[in-house]
Each structure stands twice: as structure tokens, then as C-alpha cells.
Image (tube, rainbow, N blue to C red):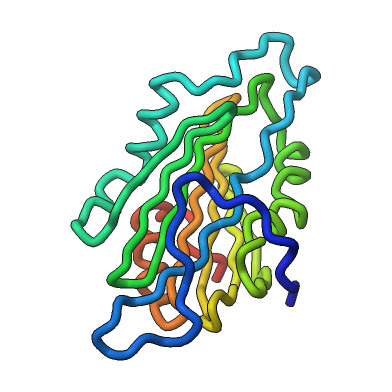
């Protein structure tokens, strides 16, 4: 199990930190620690294609990110926020009732990408960045289907609480990758699986 790295700058729009212990029965459910920063900036890869696009997201990129999960997080207990930056659109949903969170990014690779580029991108350095605010994390399994959809499954600890984490990577267009991270308390793994099956029925888990 990997220990927590040096704390990196927090996201501009993040979830509240988890409490240090389970709350009393009538207190709010603790939230998972926020992902510490955005994922690393996609590298411009001029060898993939000679025609590069702008690294600034378009309105179509924003609409794609906001609509990707369809109606899965529209219930009142899910609070949504989003931000737009160079090479990415980030959307965060937090659920204080379930002590859960969902985090989506539409990542732009201005000059395109190939599978070896994604293999290098979604590597140990990426996970150290993602889980920098967690006390520990462990990669349990990884898998992919014939269409290139990837899934990484983790266990993680924050504030003394255990969380189940699923992280999908979808090749969306020639220059865009969608990532979705679901974080639920360990005892709510069934709820995480249900959301995963609704959003990614072709690869809900690695079992």
C-alpha cells in the first residue's frame, strides 16, 4: 500500500475533507478527500497527426462533459460544479448523504494520442497525483474491453475511513479522452457498482 505523497494544491472546486472518525448517528456523512489536483496536462504529440487542434476546450467539449453521465447524478443529493481550463473540462458531483463523490474530466490531446501514450499517461505518477490527499491507496485490478475502455479499481483511505474507487478511461474522439472516477464508502460498494453499470454497462467492473 502506497503512503500519501507531499500535499499538492487542491482543486479550485473540491469536496470537503473527510472527518477523522465515523460521525455520530445524526451528523452528516463524511466526504472522501478531494482528488488533490487535476490529472497531468495531456502532452502534445506531434507524431500522431500533423493537424493539431486548439488546446482550449470548445462549447462542444463542455457540453460533452456535462452530459456524459446523462441522468445518473441529477437527484437532489448530488451537487454539481464544473470548471474549464487549458486541455480539460472538469466536472465534480458530491453527495453528502452517501459520503460519495464523482469526478469527470474531458481531457484534450491537441495533436491526438495512441494507446502507448495512454499507457504512459495513466501510470503510477498519475495515481500519486490523484490520491495525494489520501492517507493511502492500493490498485486492486485493471482491465479493458475490446473497444479500448479501461477500468482501474482501487481501495483508498481518508480520515481513517475506507473507500472503494473505480476509475474509467474512455477513448472518446481522436483528440479527447473521458475519465470518470467514482468514490464511495467501502460499505457502499454495491451503490458504486450500480452507478458503474448504468454509465459503463460494457465494463462495470473487472470481475
Residue 192 lies in quadrant: bottom left
At horizontal 59% and vertical 15% (from top left) the residue drawn is 54
Residue 85 vs 116, above or below: the answer is above
Q: Horizontal placement of 194 versus 143: left or right?
A: left
Query: In the rendering, at what x and y percent does residue 165 appear?
Result: 53, 67
Q: Residue furthest top?
A: 51
At horizontal 76% and vertical 24% (from top left) the residue drawn is 45
Query: In the rendering, at what x and y percent does residue 94 appear?
Result: 36, 58
Query: In the rendering, at what x and y percent does residue 90 appear?
Result: 47, 40
Q: What is the tally of numbered marks visible in this picture?
A: 0
Query: In the rendering, at what x and y percent does residue 78 appear?
Result: 28, 57
Q: Quarter of the image for the N terminus: give it.
A: bottom right
Which of these two is toward me, 197 or 138? 138
At horizontal 32% and vertical 72% (from top left) the residue drawn is 98
Residue 96 lies in quadrant: bottom left
Residue 115 vs 56, above or below: the answer is below
Q: Horizontal placement of 47 versus 198: left or right?
A: right
Q: Residue furthest left?
A: 76
Q: Horizontal placement of 185 versus 10: left or right?
A: left
Which of these two is toward me, 197 or 9? 9
At horizontal 43% and vertical 58% (from top left) the residue drawn is 15
Q: Horizontal placement of 45 versus 24: left or right?
A: right
Q: Quarter of the image for the C terminus: give it.
A: bottom right
Amino acid at each position: 500500500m502506497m503512503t500519501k505523497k507531499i500535499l499538492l494544491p487542491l482543486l479550485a472546486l473540491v469536496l470537503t475533507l473527510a472527518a477523522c472518525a465515523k460521525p455520530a448517528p445524526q451528523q452528516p456523512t463524511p466526504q472522501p478527500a478531494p482528488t488533490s489536483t487535476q490529472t497531468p496536462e495531456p502532452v502534445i504529440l506531434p507524431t500522431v497527426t500533423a493537424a493539431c487542434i486548439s488546446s482550449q476546450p470548445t462549447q462542444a467539449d463542455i457540453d460533452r462533459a456535462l452530459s456524459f453521465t446523462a441522468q445518473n447524478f441529477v437527484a437532489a443529493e448530488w451537487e454539481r460544479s464544473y470548471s474549464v481550463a487549458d486541455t480539460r473540462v472538469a466536472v465534480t458531483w458530491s453527495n453528502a448523504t452517501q459520503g460519495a463523490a464523482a469526478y469527470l474530466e474531458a481531457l484534450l490531446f491537441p495533436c491526438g494520442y495512441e494507446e502507448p501514450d495512454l499507457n504512459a499517461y495513466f501510470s503510477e505518477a498519475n495515481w500519486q497525483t490523484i490520491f495525494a490527499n489520501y492517507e493511502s491507496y492500493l490498485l486492486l485490478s485493471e482491465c479493458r474491453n475490446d473497444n479500448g475502455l479501461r477500468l482501474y479499481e482501487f481501495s483508498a483511505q481518508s480520515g481513517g475511513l475506507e473507500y472503494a474507487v473505480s476509475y474509467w478511461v474512455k477513448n472518446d474522439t481522436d483528440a479527447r479522452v473521458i475519465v470518470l472516477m467514482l468514490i464511495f464508502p467501502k460499505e457502499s460498494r454495491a451503490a458504486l457498482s450500480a452507478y458503474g453499470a448504468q454509465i459503463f454497462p460494457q465494463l462495470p467492473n473487472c470481475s
